Amino acid sequence: MSKDVKTPRWGWALTGSGHFVKETLAIIKRVPDLDLFLSSAAEEVLNMYKQDLVLSEGSRIYKDRTASAAPVGNFYYGVYHTLILGPATSNTVAKCVYGISDNLATNVFAQAGKCRVPAIVFACDTAPEMDTEAPKGMVKVYPRRIDLENTEKLKSFEDTTVVETIEEFERAIDARQKWLNGSSS
């Protein structure tokens, strides 16, 4: 690792969700000392929504290009103080709940848990009826009971904060930053 790369850092995993993707990208560009983990599905969604990644100086991007999700090894060495996973699709939430780590996003969540790195998860499917932005405009979606149940199960995970709205997401990140600032002084 380069001597000018600050550690510990924020880790942020993007999944294949378009739910509040534009607002999420606005938050991402404000986060310092960030490593962004892009699942293959996340790359597809960014293209579908015609979104460019703008990151703060010193940020790094890891793409889902290896079968073993090699970049997750940094969790073992104290590189990350926090993992943010979001917006998280119902597929990603289900995989996290049941311990399936078969892509970069689910792998970093698993490794964060194994290394006791606190995680903030912005789950997408959180209400029986929701409005969300699709590439061609707003649509109504109806998350399945299993999707809602998995979001509830994830809330019981240790060192994991699950949020359900973009406002809660921002507050959780801000609260973590304040805690980090207080603990490092």
Image (cartoon, rainbow, N blue to C red):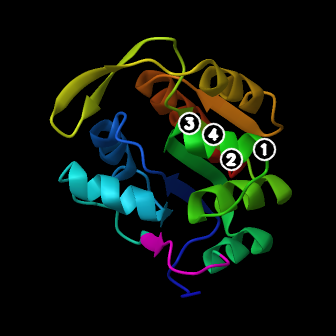
Residue ID at (43%, 11%)? 129
Marks 2/1 in contact by CB < 8 Å: the verdict is yes
User: For the residue labelled by badge 1, is the local secondary structure a helix, a strand or a loop?
Assistant: loop
Residue occupied by mark 1 = 98
Report if the CB atoms under discs 2 and 4 are less than 8 Å apart: yes
Mark 3 to mark 1 CA distance (whole Å): 12 Å
Q: Is residue 15 magenta?
A: no
Quarter of the rendering occupied by the N terminus = bottom right
What residue is pinned by disc 4?
A: 93
User: If you read the primary sequence from the N terminus, does the residue marked by circle 1 or circle 4 appear first?
Assistant: 4
Quarter holding residue 44 = bottom left
Q: Residue at x 43, y 23 (%)?
A: 167
For disc 4, the neighbor class at 10 Å (few under 14, some 14 to 19, many from 20) is many
In percent of width and height, residue 11 lies at 57, 59
Element class at badge 2 = helix
Q: Secondary structure at mark 3?
A: helix
Question: Does residue 37 lie above or below 97 as drawn?
Answer: below
Above or below, comparing residue 179 to residue 36 in the picture: above
Residue shown at the point (40%, 56%) measured from the top left: 42
Q: Nearer the viewer, residue 28 or 123?
A: 123
Q: Label 2: which residue?
A: 95
Real-space CA distance between mark 3 and mark 2, rounded to the nearest whole angstrom: 9 Å
Q: Position of residue 53 (x, y in %)?
A: 28, 60
Three-letter amino acid code of the residue under disc 3: Ser
Q: Which residue is mark 3?
A: 90
Instruction: Please provide the residue range marked out in magenta.
Output: 60-68
